[in-house]
Image (cartoon, rainbow, N blue to C red):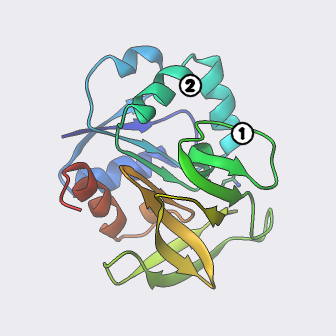
């Protein structure tokens, strides 16, 4: 198995380290050439959705990646990655891949001071650590979307087919549950 990690900005190295701990190979996607080799899954990291979005367009990566996602490439977006996959952002007119039937609120917990830690249930995997950094939450889920986690009544993780999103950063805690879930999803085990 080979996972492509979008490495334009944000917390991509931490995702690579989590995958390595699971014994899964990954490579960085920085330019069009990087999309030439086949891969089984894509991770869109946290960072700044506006910056990652701008770079995706400037580097000519936006349309090819959108096509891969629409063609069914398993994709996991964290935080800014969630915003890039959301069908709409309640408080931002910008639109990106729009591949998941969810609406998100950007910087939903405040712009600077809205970083916090929680422990809550994720899917059927029990409680896991969740680090939120200027995070969004999901304010609406549409057809085909399964809610995987909620914190204080707000949806913070969801799945639609082979797409997975978390508002928190599972790559920043020493817990492999969410990455392992993504790998099982790619393998068709869940
Ligand atoms: N940690 C994050 O990815 C923060 C997301 C950021 N607030 C954004 O709007 O893109």
31 w.r.t. 169: above or below:
above
Q: Nearer the viewer, mark 1 or mark 2?
A: 2
Q: CA distance from mark 1 to mark 2?
A: 13 Å
Residue corresponding to mark 2:
62
Quarter of the figure that contains the C terminus: bottom left
Q: Can you tell me whether the CB of the residue at mark 1 lies under 8 Å from the nearest atom of ligand 1?
A: yes
Task: Give how far across and how far down residue 138 sits, in percent.
Answer: 63, 64
Residue at image location 57% in from the left, 59% down from the top: 142
Q: Secondary structure at mark 2?
A: helix
22 w.r.t. 175: above or below:
above
Task: Give how far across and how far down residue 175 sits, in percent.
Answer: 34, 71
Q: State the residue in front, 136 or 133.
A: 136
How packed mark 2 is, by other alpha carbons closer than 10 Å (few <14, some 14-19, many 20 or more), is: some
Task: Give how far across and how far down residue 19 sits, in percent.
Answer: 28, 52
**Residue 32 - label:** none
**Residues at discs 1 and 2 in contact (Cβ within 8 Å):** no
**Residue 50 - label:** 1
Residue at image location 56% in from the left, 69% down from the top: 156
On the image, which quarter does residue 29 sit in?
top left
Q: Can you tell me whether the CB of the residue at mark 2 lies under 8 Å from the nearest atom of ligand 1?
A: no
């Amino acid at each position: 198995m080979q996972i492509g990690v979008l490495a334009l900005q944000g917390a991509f190295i931490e995702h690579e380290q989590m995958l390595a701990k699971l014994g899964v190979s990954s490579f960085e996607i920085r330019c069009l050439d990087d999309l030439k080799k086949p891969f089984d899954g894509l991770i869109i990291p946290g960072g700044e959705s506006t910056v990652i979005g701008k770079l995706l367009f400037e580097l000519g990566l936006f349309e090819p990646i959108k096509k891969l996602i629409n063609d069914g490439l398993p994709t996991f977006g964290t935080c800014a990655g969630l915003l890039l996959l959301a069908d709409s952002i309640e408080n931002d007119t910008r639109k990106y891949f729009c591949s998941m039937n969810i609406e998100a609120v950007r910087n939903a917990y405040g712009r600077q001071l809205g970083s916090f830690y929680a422990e809550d249930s994720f899917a059927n995997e029990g409680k896991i650590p969740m680090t939120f950094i200027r995070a969004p939450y999901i304010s609406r889920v549409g057809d085909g979307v399964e809610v995987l986690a909620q914190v204080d009544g707000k949806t913070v993780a969801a799945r639609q087919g082979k797409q997975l999103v978390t508002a928190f950063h599972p790559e920043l805690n020493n817990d492999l549950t969410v990455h392992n879930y993504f790998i099982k999803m790619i393998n068709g085990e869940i």
